[in-house]
């Protein structure tokens, strides 16, 4: 792999740029739509991947080769999440050093190879290994893509765009659910081949996305800080050419020290000393949503099969409406994060999600819901929770400096998922194995408490970042003083 480009020996040590202001003043144009489609489709792919893994749990148990237990399925889910944690950290660090564009090709390639390999798993440990590597690719995608999108989208649209892009995960979930109904039908494929074909199809779709990304440019903001100002200016002009003419009046400029990379010592000083309060907010939001989502969704199929007697080949039919509620939440609520504001909307969606989960969990424990009723209840819960979870990625991306943005997303995704997400599937898999609704309800209550607590943290210490430039929210570490 070629070494990343560095500033030339003749490049100035300090540059002045108006690129951030130029990008933020733009109206929404064709370029924004295209870049969101090319990069945001990652979340559709992730939704497809995770949904297939959840929907095939019954098939994995019935597989003559694998014969998984519920605990094995929870272990496989945890392997995927641990891979995502380590992938986010490693690839996030490289994203800030090598650039956004290079990394979103590398991470997608890792995903493609690992997903294809999963189709040929022969036992629990091979399946877990390939799921771990798949998660590593997806974890790296989160960091590279989130940072790129936030750096391209104008400030006034950043909140709703980020939420809708992250919420598009559930379009993939719907596709995965629908596909699983066909592929897991024993009349179509035998039980030991249907689940394998699910992963083959996922890798094939990823290959198409790889080709779609070839035209997406590097982030102009990243280029400027790495001494490649002319390249950044050319890309900014290209983006501006898609929109309407603007007042030619000069815009405010930033003065930045050129740097090839940011030392890790400075990274952690920025994350945990300078912005310590923001770090605590990001950690609370990411941990709560990770446990909430992964605990419930990774064991969704197990609850339906073990407590409601739903056949493994019919799980997808119940995931479809669940996915619809999850996607519609960010679409409907997203604009309010830019108008009403980040602090009240993030806090409100977290707290309401926790209350709704506790209520639906009580109905489940009291056996007052059918399989259809349970699905409707979760549709309502996750209509709100999906917007809340997406806002966690928005928060950790926009409240930290440009030079450490990708790594900040990676660190809080990794820590949050490690604390809240990795334990969730194993815990809930074990709770479902007890056959006790009360035990499962206790798990729901714990997830509910985490969401309410995170909402309170956001209400007190969250940052009001709506409509503001990224450089205004968090001054770049490379900022130079005005002479």
Image (cartoon, helix red, strand yellow):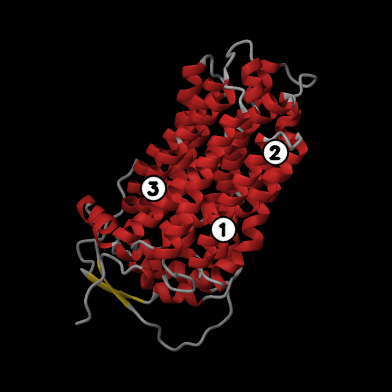
* Image position of 225 (left or right of 100): left
* Disc with the residue nearer the chain's start (1 vs 3): 1
Question: How packed is label 2: few (under 14 Cα within 10 Å), some, or many (20 or more)?
Answer: many
- Mark 3 or 2, which is nearer the eye? 2
* Disc with the residue nearer the chain's start (3 vs 2): 2
- Locate the C terminus and report the quarter of the image it occupies: bottom left
Q: From the image, tell me which residue sits under label 3.
A: 410
Q: Position of residue 121 (x, y in %)?
A: 54, 18
Q: From the image, tell me which residue sits under label 2.
A: 319
Q: How far separated are the C-alphas under marks 1 and 2?
A: 22 Å
The residue sitting at 55% across, 70% down in the picture is: 338
Query: Given the current orientation, which residue lies at the most extreme front position?
Result: 366
- Mark 1 or 2, which is nearer the eye? 1
Q: Secondary structure at mark 2?
A: helix
Viewer-proximal residue among 344 and 400: 344
Q: From the image, tell me which residue sits under label 1.
A: 349
Q: Position of residue 60 (x, y in %)?
A: 62, 20
Q: Position of residue 56 (x, y in %)?
A: 64, 26
The residue sitting at 33% across, 66% down in the picture is: 224
The residue sitting at 69% across, 27% down in the picture is: 307
Q: Are marks 3 and 2 in contact (CB under 8 Å)?
A: no
Residue 116's image quarter?
top right
* Image position of 196 (left or right of 87): right
Q: Secondary structure at mark 3?
A: helix
* Disc with the residue nearer the chain's start (1 vs 2): 2
Answer above or below: position of 147 versus 63: below
Q: How far separated are the C-alphas under marks 1 and 3?
A: 23 Å
Query: Given the current orientation, which residue lies at the most extreme top position?
Result: 64
């Amino acid at each position: 792999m070629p070494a990343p480009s560095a500033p030339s020996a003749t490049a100035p040590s300090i540059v002045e740029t108006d690129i951030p202001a130029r990008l933020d003043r733009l109206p929404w144009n064709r370029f924004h739509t295209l870049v969101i489609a090319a990069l945001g489709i990652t979340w559709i792919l992730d939704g497809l991947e995770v949904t297939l893994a959840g929907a095939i749990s019954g098939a994995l148990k019935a597989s003559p080769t694998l014969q998984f237990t519920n605990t094995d399925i929870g272990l496989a889910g945890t392997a995927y999440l641990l891979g995502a944690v380590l992938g986010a950290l490693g690839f996030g660090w490289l994203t800030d050093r090598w650039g956004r564009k290079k990394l979103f090709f590398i991470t997608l390639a890792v995903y493609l190879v690992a997903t294809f390999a999963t189709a040929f798993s022969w036992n629990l440990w091979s399946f877990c290994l390939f799921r771990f590597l798949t998660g590593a690719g997806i974890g790296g995608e989160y960091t590279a893509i989130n940072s790129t999108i936030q750096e391209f989208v104008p400030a006034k649209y950043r909140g709703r765009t980020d939420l809708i892009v992250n919420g598009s995960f559930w379009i993939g979930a719907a596709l995965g659910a629908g596909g699983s109904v066909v592929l897991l039908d024993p009349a179509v494929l035998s039980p030991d081949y249907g689940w394998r074909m699910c992963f083959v199809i996922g890798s094939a779709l990823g290959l198409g996305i790889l080709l779609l990304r070839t035209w997406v440019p590097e982030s102009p903001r990243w280029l400027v800080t790495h001494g490649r100002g002319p390249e950044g200016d050319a890309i900014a002009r290209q983006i501006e050419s898609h929109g309407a003419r603007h007042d030619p009046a000069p815009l405010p400029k930033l003065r930045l020290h050129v740097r090839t990379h940011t030392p890790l010592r400075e990274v952690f000083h920025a994350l945990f000393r300078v912005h310590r309060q923001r770090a605590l907010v990001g950690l609370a939001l990411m941990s709560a949503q990770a446990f909430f989502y992964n605990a419930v969704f990774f064991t969704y199929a197990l609850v339906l099969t073990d407590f409601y007697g739903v056949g493994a080949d019919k799980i997808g039919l119940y995931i479809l409406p669940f996915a619809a509620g999850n996607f519609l939440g960010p679409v409907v609520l997203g604009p309010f994060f830019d108008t009403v504001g980040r602090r009240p909307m993030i806090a409100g969606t977290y707290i309401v999600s926790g209350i709704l989960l506790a209520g639906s969990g009580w109905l489940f424990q009291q056996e007052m819901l059918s399989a259809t009723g349970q699905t409707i209840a979760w549709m309502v819960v996750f209509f709100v929770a999906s917007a809340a979870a997406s806002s966690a990625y928005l928060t950790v991306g926009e409240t930290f400096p440009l030079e450490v943005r990708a790594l900040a997303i990676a660190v809080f995704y990794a820590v949050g998922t490690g604390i809240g997400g990795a334990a969730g599937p194993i815990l809930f898999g074990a709770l479902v194995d007890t056959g006790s609704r009360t035990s499962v309800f206790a798990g729901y209550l714990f997830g509910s408490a985490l969401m309410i607590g995170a909402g309170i943290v956001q209400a007190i210490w969250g940052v009001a970042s709506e409509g503001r430039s990224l450089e205004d929210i968090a001054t770049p570490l490379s900022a130079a003083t005005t002479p």
